[in-house]
Image (cartoon, rainbow, N blue to C red):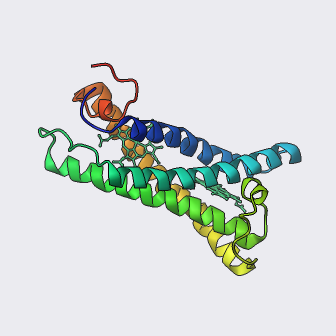
C-alpha cells in the first residue's frame, strides 16, 4: 500500500464523491418543469435525506482526518501545485458544507419535512421563517456553480495525475490500489 490516506479516508472520499456527484443532477431534475408529481416527490425525498447523510459523513470525515492526517504529497511535486491542491481541497470541504447547510436551512425554515430526521424526532430544530428560507434557497441555487467549478479543477487534476503523470498521487486515495 503506497503512502497517502488510510482506508477509512479512502472509502469516505469515494462514498461521498458518488453521493455528491449524484446530488447535483438530482437537485436540478427535481425542480425542472414537466416532471410528474410522483417522480418529483421521490427525487425530493432522496435529495433531502441523502443531503443530510452527506452532512453527517462530512463531519465524520473531518474528525477522522484530524486524528489521522494524510502523509505529505510527493517531494517532487512543485510547490505551487501542492498549494493549489491544498487550497482546492479546503474549498471543496467549504462548498460541500455550504450546500448541505443552505439546503437544510431552506427546508427547515420553509416548514418542509426531512423524512429521516422526522422519524427520529430531530426535525424541525428551527421555527418556520419564510424570508430566511428564501435567502437560503437563493444561496443554495448559486452555490452549485462554485461547487461545480471546484469539481472540474479537482477531477481534472486528479485524472492528469492518474493518466499522464502517473506519479502515485491517484493511488493515495484510490481504495483498491495494488502496488
Ligand atoms: C471522479 C471524481 C474524483 C476523483 C478522480 C478524485 C480524486 C482525488 C484524489 C487523487 C485525491 C488525493 C489528493 C492527495 O493525494 O492529496 C482527492 C482528495 C480529495 N477529494 Fe477527490 N476526487 C473525486 C471526486 C471528489 C468529489 C466529488 C469531492 C467532493 C466534493 C472530492 C473531494 C476531495 C477532498 C476534499 C480531498 C482532500 C481530502 C483530504 O485531504 O482530506 N473529490 N481526490
Ligand atoms: C452536497 C449537498 C447538496 C448539493 C450538491 C445540492 C444541490 C442542489 C441543486 C443543484 C439544486 C437545484 C437548484 C435549483 O435549480 O433550484 C438543489 C435544490 C434543492 N435542494 Fe439541494 N443540494 C445539497 C444538499 C441539500 C440538503 C441537505 C437539502 C435539505 C435537507 C437540500 C434541499 C434542496 C431543496 C429543497 C431544493 C429545491 C430548492 C427549491 O427550488 O426550493 N439540498 N440542490
Q: Which residue is depicted at the point 45% across and 36% down?
A: 11
Residue 145 on image: x %, y %: 51, 56
Query: Exactly how many numbered labels are in the figure?
Result: 0
Compared with 26, 120 (above or below) is: below
Q: Quadrant of the C terminus?
A: top left
In the image, 2 versus 108, the foreground residue is 2
Compared with 34, 120 (above or below) is: below
Look at the image and tell me whether residue 45 can be seen: yes
Lateral position of residue 163 relative to residue 54, left or right: left
Lateral position of residue 75 relative to residue 119, left or right: left
In the image, 144 versus 44, the foreground residue is 44
Q: Residue furthest top?
A: 178
Lateral position of residue 62 relative to residue 104, left or right: left
Q: Quadrant of the N terminus?
A: top left
Q: Which residue is depicted at the point 28% across and 52% down?
A: 86
Look at the image and tell me whether residue 137 can be seen: no
Residue 23 on image: x %, y %: 61, 46
Q: Quadrant of residue 139?
A: bottom right
Q: Which residue is depicted at the point 26% across and 52% down?
A: 84
In the image, 37 versus 178, the foreground residue is 178
Q: Quadrant of residue 7?
A: top left
Lateral position of residue 129 relative to residue 73, left or right: right
Residue 78 on image: x %, y %: 14, 44
Residue 105 on image: x %, y %: 65, 69
Q: Splitting the image into four quadrants, where does ligand 1 fall? A: top left
Q: Which residue is depicted at the point 54% across and 38% down?
A: 18
Q: Residue furthest left?
A: 76
Amino acid at each position: 500500500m503506497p503512502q497517502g490516506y488510510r482506508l477509512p479516508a479512502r472509502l469516505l472520499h469515494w462514498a461521498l464523491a458518488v453521493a455528491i456527484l449524484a446530488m447535483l443532477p438530482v437537485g436540478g431534475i427535481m425542480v425542472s418543469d414537466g416532471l410528474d408529481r410522483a417522480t418529483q416527490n421521490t427525487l425530493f425525498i432522496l435529495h433531502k435525506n441523502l443531503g443530510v447523510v452527506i452532512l453527517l459523513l462530512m463531519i465524520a470525515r473531518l474528525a477522522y482526518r484530524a486524528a489521522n492526517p494524510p502523509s505529505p504529497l510527493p517531494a517532487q511535486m512543485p510547490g505551487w501545485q501542492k498549494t493549489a491542491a491544498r487550497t482546492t481541497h479546503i474549498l471543496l470541504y467549504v462548498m460541500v458544507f455550504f450546500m448541505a447547510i443552505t439546503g437544510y436551512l431552506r427546508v427547515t425554515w420553509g416548514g418542509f419535512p426531512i423524512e429521516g430526521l422526522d422519524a427520529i424526532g430531530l426535525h424541525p430544530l428551527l421555527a418556520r421563517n419564510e424570508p430566511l428560507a428564501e435567502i437560503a434557497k437563493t444561496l443554495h441555487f448559486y452555490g452549485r456553480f462554485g461547487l461545480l467549478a471546484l469539481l472540474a479543477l479537482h477531477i481534472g487534476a486528479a485524472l492528469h495525475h492518474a493518466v499522464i503523470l502517473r506519479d502515485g498521487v491517484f493511488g493515495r486515495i484510490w481504495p483498491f490500489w495494488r502496488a
